[in-house]
Amino acid sequence: MAKIPYKIYLEEKEIPTSWYNVRSAMKNKPAPLLNPGTLKPMKAEELEGVFCKELVAQELDNDTPFFKIPDEILDFYKMYRPSPLMRAYRLEKQLGTPAKIYYKFEGNNTSGSHKLNSAIAQAYYAKKQGLKGVTTETGAGQWGTALAMACAYFDLDCKVYMVKVSYEQKPFRREVMRTYGASVTPSPSTETEVGRKILAEHPGTTGSLGCAISEAVEKAVTNEGYRYVLGSVLNQVLLHQSVIGLETKAALDKVGEKADIIIGCAGGGSNLGGLVSPFMGEKLRGERDYKIIAVEPASCPSLTRGKFAYDFCDTGMVCPLAKMYTLGSGFIPAPNHAGGLRYHGMSSILSQLYHDGYMEAVSYNQTDVFEAAELFARSEGILPAPESSHAIKGAIDEALKCKEAGEEKTIVFGLTGTGYFDMVAYEKFHNGEMSDYIPTDDEIGAYLAKLPKTG
């Protein structure tokens, strides 16, 4: 049998023409979003005051298997898609494992990550609705960068609230956003009422995604012609990101491979949900079984140590409540945490699937994650983003288990992006200045004790 190439490319004509909605195969659908005032399920007209109308329809649809991708979005996708599925031959050799390791590389676009797949879709629907612009939050900066690019393409204004610790650690990332025309504000800020409140309650805070979401939502609802867009967590985002999994499955089929283990890093759930969606659909329908693993940071362990409950999606408690695995909307990761994936909760889709036993979750210390990143960079020649490196660590561990058991399994993981704007974190790791912090049960318990009472 011929050797499988290092890079498995699909042709342009093989780019998916529809997004796959994994909810259509779920017996237990994700619980509905709740109105923060009434605690009743949110209606479309209520959500349309915050989100674009077409995106609300996608958000609430639990039954339609496929959504046709508009031609304008497909034209943009063709600038950088299909992305390659890579065989990690050198990493396999380094590990001495009989396992076959593949990774879907989403860093081959100017934004440097998978986030562009949803950013261009959300910007398209905003433009189609006749809006002036959009507001959003960003943590490590990948989402803000992708949205700034997408808004420039559709001539939309873009206002980004960037978690303060990342704003300070990653100045070049924010400058890329500004190059594409976005305004970038460190969060929490004094620009918004909720930002000022958070600063008063937590002086000197380094911020969190929950804080930044609150500010972005307030800015959207108080400025005519604007809507809020989100880079992860929401059903609509996982829908757009399904292009990753659809392409991955098509590439594996092209070389006659079947995945046994599928691994993705997990912060809010966008890349993991996108990667696993078509495989999870097969698993839910009983057509094929897969071991699916979510990898998260030990410093922000929503799946492995959180509670499956309704919680606010933001720190300011102005957004709808979602039923998800959460650490509490007030949870703020330690400032020494450099690996991204800083959100306090997890996608309702992934939370339900995890709760129902269809996937597993593990957490890792950030120094172990950066060790894996360095090994991968030296083996495969790509400097990975810290977020992606969680998946790399998970893949290495599974490959070593195969080595110990003498099993030849096929492992697939998502390499969500590159780490060239994360050199401060790499510098701290190399200088021995990076430390691991794991929140105690008491610390997490204090936030979980404040979860809203929904009855």
Image (cartoon, grey):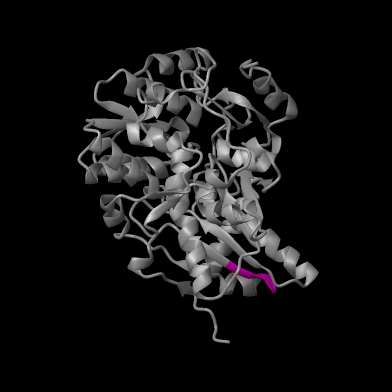
Residue lying at 66% horizontally and 64% vertically, measured from the top left: 260
Residue 111 percent location from the top left of the image: 35, 50
Q: The N terminus lies in which quarter of the figure?
A: bottom right
Which sits in the foreground, 263 or 202? 263
Camera sees residue 418 = no
The segment highlighted magenta reads 95-101
Instruction: Classify residue 142 by image quadrant.
Output: top left
Q: Does the magenta stretch include residue 230?
A: no
Camera sees residue 407 = yes
The mark tally for this picture is: 0
Instruction: Classify residue 330 by image quadrant.
Output: top right
Residue lying at 48% horizontally and 31% vertically, measured from the top left: 209
Instruction: Classify residue 231 by image quadrant.
Output: top left
Q: The C terminus lies in which quarter of the figure?
A: top right
Q: Residue lying furthest bottom in this view?
A: 1
Q: In the picture shown, does residue 404 fall above or below 284?
A: below
Q: Residue lying furthest right in this view?
A: 405
Residue 344 percent location from the top left of the image: 57, 31
Asked if residue 418 lies left or right of residue 297, the reply is: left
